[in-house]
Image (cartoon, grey):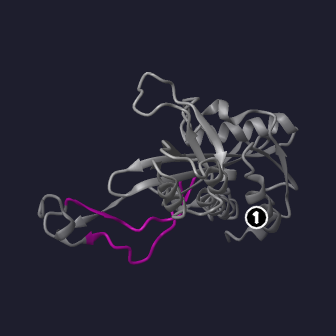
Amino acid sequence: MSNSPSTHSKVVHQTVALLTKHGKQTLIAPLFREAFNSTIVHTDTFDTDLLGAFDHSVERTLTPSQAALKKAYLSCEATGCNQGIGSEGSINSIFGVGLVDEEYLAFIDIEKKLEVVARVHSGLALGPIRADTEISLKEQLSKYNNEQAWMLSKNKLNDATQKEQWEKGLTANELLLRFKDVENIDVYLEPDFRAMHCPDRQTVITKCAEKLIEQLNSFCPECGKVDFDVCHAKVRYVTCELCTLPTNQVQERAKTCSACGFEESIPNVKTVGSAFYCSFCNP
């Protein structure tokens, strides 16, 4: 069976709901229109910040994948559509790497009981700013995209008893105007990671939407179901040429069906590798 989408019934309908209050529809809708001739029905009737916010005013209780799926179902409830999309971003600091943005997009079909989740991650060259002079503030802001917005701390520095309070969505120009000709400023900023204020996240969200479309266009040659992708493959490690224990190298991952588990065969896949990558032979 060919896995070309033309040989299968169309998965994505003419209208698909999307729940977001942060402008993600402008990134996702054009891609779905081009790929499926589908119209994104945007809704913001549910406050998605209730599921977690970047300023920690609401802590997250769901995994990013679970949150994206929940938003997809909520989008269908709000619009009456049978299909919906939910989005969730997770930003973490990794030692030696810096900030990493993980974006998740979930597509659901209530009638077919279909759930497809795409994930893309990328580093973010963003960080906090602390400035005590107007010149220092201007220099630090100039390092970043002018479209990037910032959160200004309203707390007194070094006061751990205060609950975090932020003034959000401030552009570099607004900040420079506010502190123009002000002596002895005491400014602490963090990036506003909300999608409409963070160009770097917008790039990753776009890539995630492209990944979701790829998964929705990939069909299992065994059972014909959608979502035949390497993200479902089991992780297998290359074995050591000397001791045959698993090394730190991961084998090439094969496309795997999320429904039946069928795995694509990869010719001449590398299964044995150098002892250089073996923790036992080369500790």
The image position of residue 63, as x and y in percent, is 53, 37
The image position of residue 211, as x and y in percent, is 63, 62
| Residue drawn at point x = 12 percent, y = 64 percent | 282
Residue 262 is inside the magenta segment: yes
> In this orientation, which residue lies closer to the viewer: 79 or 183?
183
| Residue drawn at point x = 81 percent, y = 64 percent | 36
Q: Can residue 132 be seen in this view?
A: yes
In-image side of 55 versus 281 (left or right): right
Mostly what secondary structure, the magenta segment? loop
On-image quarter of the N terminus? bottom right
Residue 254 is inside the magenta segment: yes
Tag 1's secondary structure? helix
> In this orientation, which residue lies closer to the viewer: 64 or 197?
197
* Badge 1 amino acid: Leu
Residue that mark 1 sits on: 31
Give the residues in magenta. Answer: 245-272
On-image quarter of the C terminus? bottom left
19 above or below 260? above
The image position of residue 42, as x and y in percent, is 83, 47
Q: Is residue 260 visible?
A: no
